[in-house]
Image (cartoon, helix red, strand yellow):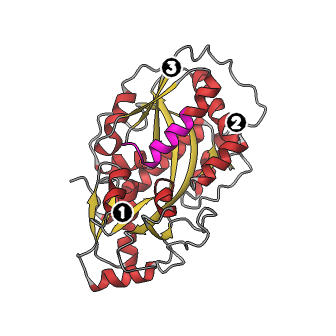
Amino acid sequence: MIVLTHAARSPLALYGAAWAIAALAMPCAGAAQPAAPDFPTRPVRIVVPFPPGGSNDILGRFMGQKLAERFGQQCVIDNRAGADGIIGTDLVAKAPPDGYTLLIVSTTFSMNPAIHQLPYDSVKSLTPISLIGAGPNLLAVSPSLPVNSVKELVALAKSKPGQLHYASSGIGGFNHFGGELFKSMAGIDIVHVPYKGGGPAMIDVMSGQVEILISTLIQALPHIRNGKLKALGVGGLKRTPTLPDVPTIAEAGVAGYDVTIWWGILGPARMPPALVTRLNADIGFVLRDPESAKRLAAEAAEPVIASPEAFGKIIATDIAKWGRIARESGIRAQ
């Protein structure tokens, strides 16, 4: 578990100084907190802005179950997919700021401003509540593709420029950025095939219609375990305990490759500070539960606990970073 405090240093080096700077906003343990409002008195809706089966959906359902136990009220998962998460995000941005409509987001949220004209302001229209966790991305292939390592895939791609394809969860999303970075660093020409979510992308790779998958490990893990996907490498700086025999993409031949995803919870703008504090505390309570940590670890994610202020600074820093990468690599909406 990562707790962003004054003393803590995140091992997620992808974010570097951004996480360390954001950590300064983390309240000290035991500090006095504002009195929480009487909340909730009815079911809470958690909007997942992607189809079922993706990493946001997996974590959204997990957090919904745990928060329902904490609240004593039902948490309803509402999948509002479309436009790389923009449709569901806009719905929450326009919702009443009473805590009864929340949003599960991932790093894709901070990438969207780089390539889309948004109907909301990513910083001003939503309230950061809490990070949930972080984990690596994944390079996998269809079992029918005759490669068993990153080096073999790169060699095959170089022998067939423009003939291999990689699936992602959508244009301009986390997996698209990760795929384009892999192409650039490996020096290969593979064609991007965007889908309306990670679930549909995996289905076509498993069936062999598309050869390569760039995904989050959390959503692909069950299919790796049952042999329907072949994992070649993970995108973090170190191997994951979940798949200890799978090398990092960097050690497998693409030196310096490092792509990690975070997930968190937002609400509409202008939420009362006491309510935000209450929700942050409830989420932190769930994440500190050893059983929750085991569950997330089994899904290849690591719990991350941070204040709303720390989360907000990470979002702002990432928006600037991914905007720069999009300009440099030519990633744009189509």
Secondary element type, mark 2: loop
Horizontal side of residue 257 vs 295, given as left or right: left
Between 191 and 31, the one lying in front of the other is: 191
Q: Distance between the residues labelled 3 and 2?
A: 29 Å
The first of marks 3 and 2 along the sequence is 2
Classify the position of the C terminus by image quarter. bottom left
The total number of labels drawn is 3
Q: What residue type is labelled 1?
A: Met
Question: Are the residues at dot 3 and dot 2 in contact (C-beta closer than 8 Å)?
Answer: no
Q: Nearer the viewer, residue 291 or 238?
A: 291
- Residue 27 marker: 2
Q: Do the residues labelled 2 and 1 touch (CB within 8 Å)?
A: no
Do residues under tags 1 and 3 come within 8 Å of each other at their CB atoms? no
Q: Residue at x 49, y 34 (%)?
A: 266
Label 1 sits on a secondary structure element that is: helix
Residue 328 can be seen in this image: no
Mark 2 crowdedness (10 Å alpha carbons): few <14, some 14-19, many ≥20: some
The nearer-to-camera label among 3 and 2 is: 3
Task: Locate residue 122, reporting x and y percent.
Answer: 40, 38
* Residue that carries the numbered disc 1 in the rendered image: 206
**x, y (%) of residue 60?**
50, 38
- Element carrying mark 3: loop
Write the start and end of the magenta stretch as one range.
51-64
Badge 1 density bin: few <14, some 14–19, many ≥20, Cα 10 Å: many
Q: Which of marks 1 and 3 is nearer the N terminus?
A: 3
Q: Which residue is located at x 60 percent, y 46 percent?
A: 22
Residue 203 visible in this rendered orientation of the protein: yes
Pointer 3 residue: 43
